Amino acid sequence: MESRLPEGWWRGRAPGRVNLIGEHVDYLGGVVLPAAVDKHTTVTGHPAKSWSVDSDVDGGLAYVRGVGEELGLGPQEVSVTSEVPPGAGISSSAALLVAVAVGARPDLDGKEAALTSQRAEQRATGVQVGVMDQFASALGQRGHALLLDCATLEYQAVPFPDELAIAVIDSGEHRSLSDTPYNERRREAEAFDPKRRRHFDSEIGRVHEFVYALGRRDFNELGRLLKQSHESLRDDFEVSTPHVDALVEQASSIAGCYGARIMGAGFGGSVLALVEASQTKTFAASIGRPVIFCSTADGAYVAARGQGQ
Ligand code: GLA
């Protein structure tokens, strides 16, 4: 049972996310296929004289304050508990932002909450992130990935099979996005640099093929598309590193792994692998790096509505 909060206090809970395919295309108005995952951040807050945050997410205060101000809240004292490890590649920042939004403003529409959280992240970090992570955290659906058109914010829930485990492998190369060429890549793609656009066009094709292969339960084809996505992110968008390339190769060669690729912004970070659910123990033992196995979950706004709030 949820404990009762004193008058004026609020609490919100939101999940992290993975992105199955459709990388570095959200801010260009492309289609993406993320899913909310079963690792959550819970935030409790109440009005105070000044902003304070007890959180182990890097820059937690700037995020919480940023989304609070976007929502028109006055200063708050906020405490955070999280199963979303920072830097592990499952978007601890989106989980934190969306948890504040759903806690303080459960009446908001999930799309508005995602856009508000995106603006807050851009303000807090100076990185011109897209809306994918916040959208998945707000509106993901258990048992599904979301096929999201980032130009219109129209989306469709795509069933995701139970037999596939989603593995997120920590490369150990951690970086703060503001220290990477993320904004530069975005500018280059917006300026129609041919290599960057080649990634965009081929990746959009792969998102549609991936959805089609999911419908046919053709897991080998999913793996082939992950491999191609990695190659395009490595060679055309140039967001991988030699260490991550080696980890992708290694993961792909383990029995029961259908395929792997760099996930999220890149420049180090994490690797996504799709693994036969019965083979997760062998995979974890063979990979030699910390790995988190995730299942799909309801997004914060979907869960809040489900509880009749
Ligand atoms: C980060 C950003 C997203 C997206 C990915 C790359 O996770 O927050 O908006 O651009 O990188 O696909």
Image (spheres, rainbow, N blue to C red):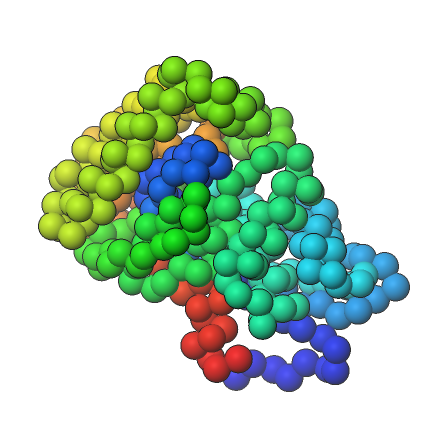
Residue 55, image x and y in percent? 67, 54
Q: Residue at 36%, 55% (x, y): give it.
A: 155
* Residue 239 in view in this figure: yes
Residue 142, image x and y in percent? 34, 64
Residue 238, image x and y in percent? 42, 19
Which residue is situated farthest in the right direction here? Answer: 49
Which residue is situated farthest in the front direction here? Answer: 152
When the figure is inspected, residue 46 is found, relative to residue 198, above or below; the finding is below
Q: How many marks?
A: 0
In this rendering, would 240 be left or right of 94? Answer: left
When the figure is inspected, residue 160 is found, relative to residue 225, above or below; the finding is below
Q: Residue at 57%, 67% (x, y): give it.
A: 108
Q: Residue at 68%, 80% (x, y): give it.
A: 5
Residue 210, image x and y in percent? 22, 42
In the foreground, 127 or 219: 127
In the foreground, 257 or 28: 28
Q: Residue at 49%, 20% (x, y): give it.
A: 191
In the foreground, 97 or 146: 146
* Residue 287 in view in this figure: no
